[in-house]
Amino acid sequence: MRFVKPSSIGGKTAAPPSKSMMQRAVAAAALASGRSSIIHPSFCDDALAAIGIAKALGAKVGEAKDAIVIEGGGEPKGIVLDCNESGLCMRMFAPIAALFGREFSLEAKGSLRKRHVGMMEGPLHKLGAECKTNNGFAPVIVKGPLHGGRVGIDGSESSQFLTGLLLALPMCKKDSMLEVKNLRSKPYVRMTVSLLEKFGVEIGHDEGLAEFSINGGQKCMPCTYDVEGDWSGAAFLLVAGAIAGRMTVMNLDAKTEQADKRIVLALENAGAKVIVGNGGVRVEKSRLAAFDFDATDCPDLFPPLVALACNCRGISKIAGVGRLRNKESDRASALAEEFAKIGGKVRIAGDVMEIEGKELHGGKVESRGDHRIAMACAVAALTSKKGILINDDSCVSKSFPDFFEKLSEAME
């Protein structure tokens, strides 16, 4: 439990490493025969889950200065792959585990047990592997070998399974063709393709990411990979600066494929002063007004944007609510209900979330074990009347373990 008091903000800090890119890099390094170095690694809970799975699949993992070294190509050491609460680990490593000619059980903890993963069964069967879930939920039992081939998948719910297929199918003997319908999180898929290029793997695709042509018989080549800063985590700190003073966040690449770099656009639309350059973003408080924003391709921005909208005159509208239903919590309902406890007015109308700008009185909220709900409420506390008490604040370790330390250091 943590209390965040009303406070002005002023400071400069570095963005946390991207957990999404870290997990992808660990998976690729585990598939490569040889030593890969991952520089500026993340050690958040999701990244640690990926490292644990890599070890179970036979990789050797060691630590060096500001880096981890992964030697892939080993033999699997067990049958249980512990995904903890990482949805990406479960959906990404299922196809990878299916490359081996043995059975694995991908296990879940906490909120991941309630997240749907049944979309993997049919496609993996068509590609030659066995896959069984518990009525669409974890645990996921897979057994290879994966052969490759032609298959269609639905990308409306998540792109994470597609990421797993893009990592695994190049290692198969057969060539593969993927037909993807209703793909939402296109930037995340581009992140995967970009990372695989660094590991020497080529993925052919059309401009709209609806068709993927993958040559089999490829190999991941060991490399040195530098994990870029995480725009998802940085978004909370940038919003803090916009509503409560000023904040500079470094280690952010404006040319990244990360979808959440669009936080800059949202801040500008709300009237904040934003300067992008020199490897970072500087945000200063200004007179903020209601904004409209489509978060369909960047749903992780909903929580920080709700905190921002509470500080804007008028009613802000954020589209893409449908992307929030299968997260660590039902994030749409969680945001509406938890912000209502502290005086916020958040209404859901179809696929749009409407937030009325008004001063929050503060109070006590439940994080619901959702790292992004905890961080959003912490940022909102800065401009509340009485501050906010957050229950189960430790859940931020899922993506941003030192979030509260960075926020506290910036308080004036």
Image: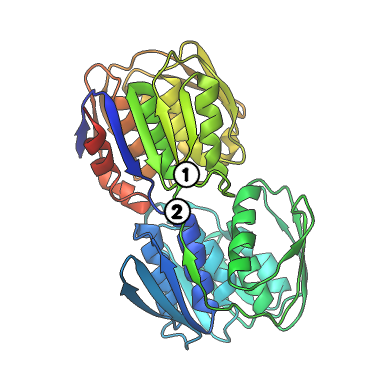
* Label 1 Cα neighbours within 10 Å, binned few <14 / some 14-19 / many ≥20: many
> What residue appears at the point 36 percent right and 65 percent down from the top-left corner?
48
The answer to which of 214 and 281 lies nearer the viewer is 281
Please state, as top left, top right, bottom left or bottom right, where the C terminus lies in the image: top left
Q: Distance between the residues labelled 1 and 2?
A: 7 Å
- Of residues 283 and 360, which is closer to you in this image? 283
User: In the image, residue 250 lies at what x, y percent?
Assistant: 40, 44
Establish if 296 lies above or below 227. Answer: above
How many numbered tags mark residues here?
A: 2
**Residue 161 appears in the figure:** no
Q: Tell me the residue that label 2 is attached to.
A: 18
Specify whether 365 is left or right of 180.
left
Amino acid under disc 2 = Ser
- Decide which of tag 1 and tag 2 comes sooner along the chain: 2
Mark 2 is surrounded, within 10 Å at the Cα level, by few (under 14), some (14 to 19) or many (20 or more) other residues, namely many
Instruction: Name the one closer to the observer, 383 or 115.
Output: 383
- Location of the N terminus by quadrant is top left
Q: What element carries label 2?
A: loop
Q: In this view, does 277 lie above or below 289?
A: below
Q: Residue at x 39, y 40 (%)?
A: 249
User: Tags 1 and 2 in contact by the CB under 8 Å rule?
Assistant: yes
Q: Provide residue 241's location: percent of width, then percent of height.
A: 36, 28
Can you identify the residue that label 1 sits on?
231
Element carrying mark 1: helix
Quarter where residue 151 is shown: bottom right
Q: What residue type is labelled 1?
A: Trp
Q: In which quarter of the image is residue 284?
A: top left
